[in-house]
Amino acid sequence: MSKTLALTEQLIALDSVTPEDKGCQNTLIALLEPLGFICETIQSGEVTNLWARKGSTQPLLVFAGHTDVVPTGPVEQWQSAPFAPTHRDGKLFGRGAADMKTSVAAFVVACEEFIAEQPDHNGSIGFLITSDEEGPATDGTVIVCNLLKERGEQIDYCIVGEPTSVDLLGDTIKNGRRGTMSGKLTIKGVQGHIAYPQLAKNPIHLAAPAMAELVAEVWDQGNDYYLPTSWQMSNIHGGTGASNVIPGEVVIDFNFRFCTASTAEGLQQRVHAILDSHQLDYALKWTVGGHPFLTPKGELSEALAAAIKAETGLDTELSTTGGTSDGRFIAKICQQVIEFGPPNASIHKIDEHIELRFIDPLKNIYRRTLENLLT
């Protein structure tokens, strides 16, 4: 059994459902300290974070990831126990196999091999690991990033081990992610008997023209890396449940997935302008879940693409699709952030898995990237 596979299985066996770490990071520390890493555990609430660094010179290449996993869902629906790593049909099954304990294991073994081959390598290597990526993400990577900023520690390159590949290992890497911003809109009317509409004020009717305008609005054109910003309604709540009562208010939940062509503030202003133009009596609560980030083609993406090509023969594709990640926090203190990991088709699902044939090549790609940047 390869070292990467063995470490992956060791991590999967620890039931680190967010925000629990369950000893995963101590397992990593035991491997990193003999390699010369200075390891620091940063506790915040229930969350365990690890900052580890080897070297004091630039450039600093950081591997970032998380040890927490999402809940298993109905255990009886799994073909094998979710925290008992199991081989079947050429795959390794277990919660976290794809998202993202294999990547974390591959980080560590890649560094072991690189340091053994290049003990006097250039620059420094770091690890930023959290147990709060799958949860609210308020006590995890953002806490460490703020601490590093206060200390003046500069990260030059960061590889986040999120599962980015689609069909084959290395076919896709993420050089950015869209921002996410939600709104809870309450449009007020006057409740009344449906037979006497002149004595009431139907907020659903009042809302409809404004919602149609918001649906039709072109928020931006996107750019070379991003599709245009999208606005979608997710929930509409109105009415008392009775068929003969005009409701007093309607509540509409919506979400923006926005690119770097727009800002959260600018989008908010435009929504308010549309609502105001319809002379609505409304209240609107905003929640910004994450701002977009973008790493244009550069040293890190080229080094990683070259490593993928050398290991797999594939020409990787840059992509900014998908949800948010901790890359949004790291991008505030690091200009070059790229996400790369195994295929993502099974993440968060029952019977999550990774194909065994991808595990050692993933480690090799990380090692080759170290060679491309630090030698």
Image (cartoon, rainbow, N blue to C red):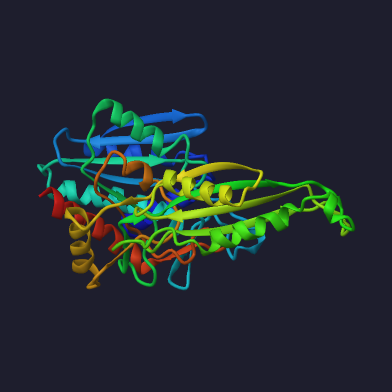
Exactly how many numbered labels are in the figure? 0
Residue 204 located left or right of residue 129: right
Q: Is residue 361 visible?
A: yes
Residue drawn 16% across the image and 54% down it: 299
Residue 67 visible? no
At x 52%, y 41%, the residue is 136
In the foreground, 263 or 151: 263
Q: Quadrant of residue 208?
A: bottom right
Instruction: Say which quarter of the image contains residue 124.
Output: top left
Quarter-of-image position of residue 308: bottom left
Q: Residue 55 or 178: which is nearer the viewer? A: 178
Q: Is residue 74 above or below residue 355?
A: above
Of residues 317 and 355, the one drawn nearer to the viewer in this rendering: 317
The answer to whether 294 appears left or right of 236 in the picture is: left
Residue 231 image position (x, y, % from top left): 51, 58
Residue 89 is left or right of residue 244, and the answer is left
Q: Nearer the viewer, residue 187 or 329?
A: 187
Expressed as whole percent of the image width and height from the top left, the position of residue 81 reads 58, 58
Q: Position of residue 193 (x, y in %)?
A: 89, 53
Pinpoint residue 66: horizontal percent, then vertical percent.
42, 45
Residue depicted at x 31% and y 44%: 331
Horizontal side, residue 115 vs residue 192: left or right = left
Q: Which quadrant is the N terminus positioned in?
A: bottom left
Residue visible at 25% across and 52% down? Answer: 110
Q: Residue furthest top?
A: 151
